[in-house]
Amino acid sequence: MYFCSRINYGGNPPENTTIVPFTRGLAGPIDFTPGTFNFKNMALPNTKVHTTLAKQLALSVVIYSPLQMASDMIENYENNPAFEFITSCPTDWSKTVVPDAKIGEFVTIARKDKVSENWFLGSITNIDARTAKLNLKFLDPNKKYIAKIFRDGKDSDYETNPYLIIIEKKEVDSKTILSVELARSGGVAIIFSQL
């Protein structure tokens, strides 16, 4: 019965990944495979992943899984500039902070790479679009960073336009507060590299 209701719904609801870090992921690392770039399911056409592409990237940071993999077929990554985030994102961290979260609604997690001075941030939302105010006080003080931002586009939407993604760079520091629009079931993923 449970299986049938999931098929009818078509996959996990958008709020699922805003709950998992605080339930299943509370005690430590979990097996989770984000990184889907193709949201069409030809075998079960009424099912799909209920996220935007930017949210899929952000999940690499939000969900701690030290044995990370890219969950899609290689041809779905070829020539897609968003794949850079997956290939750059480490699986081992020296520090983790949760600048902002409300279970079931939104989650922002930042993690520092264990072997470099780089930080990675993932911020996701449930079915509601929202503006994320990303306070970067976790960055090392008195240092400048280049933030490479992978975010939802203006017309992104998990149901109608999940593939639209904007990639941009900004200079930031620990006093910066970034304001980023998250689409419905959307997200933002950021790489912070020290200058």
Image: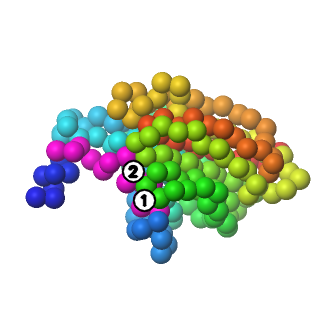
Residue annotated with mark 2: 15
Residue 155 drawn above or below residue 58: above
Residue type at mark 2 is Glu
Whole-angstrom CA distance, mark 1 to mark 2, is: 7 Å
Q: Which amino acid lies under the numbered mark 1 shown in the image of this protein?
A: Ile
The residue stretch that appears in magenta: 8-21
Q: Residue 19 carries which label?
A: 1
Q: Can residue 19 be seen in this view?
A: yes
Label 2: state its secondary structure.
loop
Residue 79 highlighted magenta (yes or no):
no
What is the secondary structure assignment of the residue under circle 1?
Answer: loop
Q: Is residue 17 magenta?
A: yes
Residue at horizontal 53 percent and vertical 25 percent from the top: 154
Numbered tag placed on residue 50 in the rendering: none
Are discs 1 and 2 less than 8 Å apart at CB?
yes
Q: Residue furthest bottom?
A: 27
Query: Taking 160 as reference, is 43 left or right?
Result: left
| Residue at the image point whose x is 63% and y is 64% from the top | 96
